[in-house]
Image (tube, helix red, strand yellow):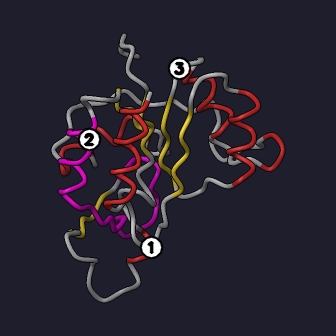
Amino acid sequence: MRGMTDKPLLLIDVDGPLNPYEALSHSRPPEGYHKHRMRPSGWHDAQPLPVLLNPAHGRELRALADAYELVWATTWKGEANEWIGPRLGLPELPYIDWPRMHGKAPRGTFWKTQYVLEYAAGRPFAWVDDDLTAYDRDFVDRNHLAAALLVRVDPRIGLIRVDFDALADWAAAL
């Protein structure tokens, strides 16, 4: 259920921005990150899913909640509230319930993009994800009349200071 607020949305992907999964091949997690073993319902591998999380991200996101309505925009969907949020000290957040995951997308865009615009329903939004490209920016510019900030996050390093600063500055400028 969506909250009723005039704040812009902050749409948060888990794998890439919060869980820099491409750093898992290193012998030690990046500084500040802790390795967790999780078994969300979509994970059918014999071994639990290794997930890297940095508690500082929870503090940063809670600080941004003054300027944004935080929303999960992840394939974890509502399970992010069970597996990810508590480890970052986040309250339960609304989430995008993707009508179809990993499906066809318009004009070379990421499969999530069309659904993000439906969810935003004309509201300003910032979106952090590791799969964003110029195609997504162009699609959002053409099809979303409100302000939008798309922040591509490197899945080897996750969200960093410059990303949080850009999100804060963008919301303050609205």
Amino acid type of the residue tagged 1 in the rendering: Arg
Q: Nearer the viewer, mark 1 or mark 3?
A: 3
Seen from this angle, which residue lies furthest bottom? 27
Q: Are marks 1 and 3 in contact (CB under 8 Å)?
A: no
Identity of the residue drawn at 34% across and 41% down? 168
Label 1: element kind = loop
Seen from this angle, which residue lies furthest right? 107
Give the class, few, some or many, for how many residues have Cα within 10 Å of label 2's Cα (few <14, many ≥20). few
Q: Are marks 2 and 1 in contact (CB under 8 Å)?
A: no
Seen from this angle, which residue lies furthest front? 173
Amino acid type of the residue tagged 2 in the rendering: Glu
Mark number, residue 156:
1
In primary-sequence order, the first of circles 2 and 1 is 2
Is 86 covered by the magenta stretch? no
Identity of the residue drawn at 68% across and 45% down? 137
In the displayed structure image, the side of residue 113 where residue 68 appears, left or right: left
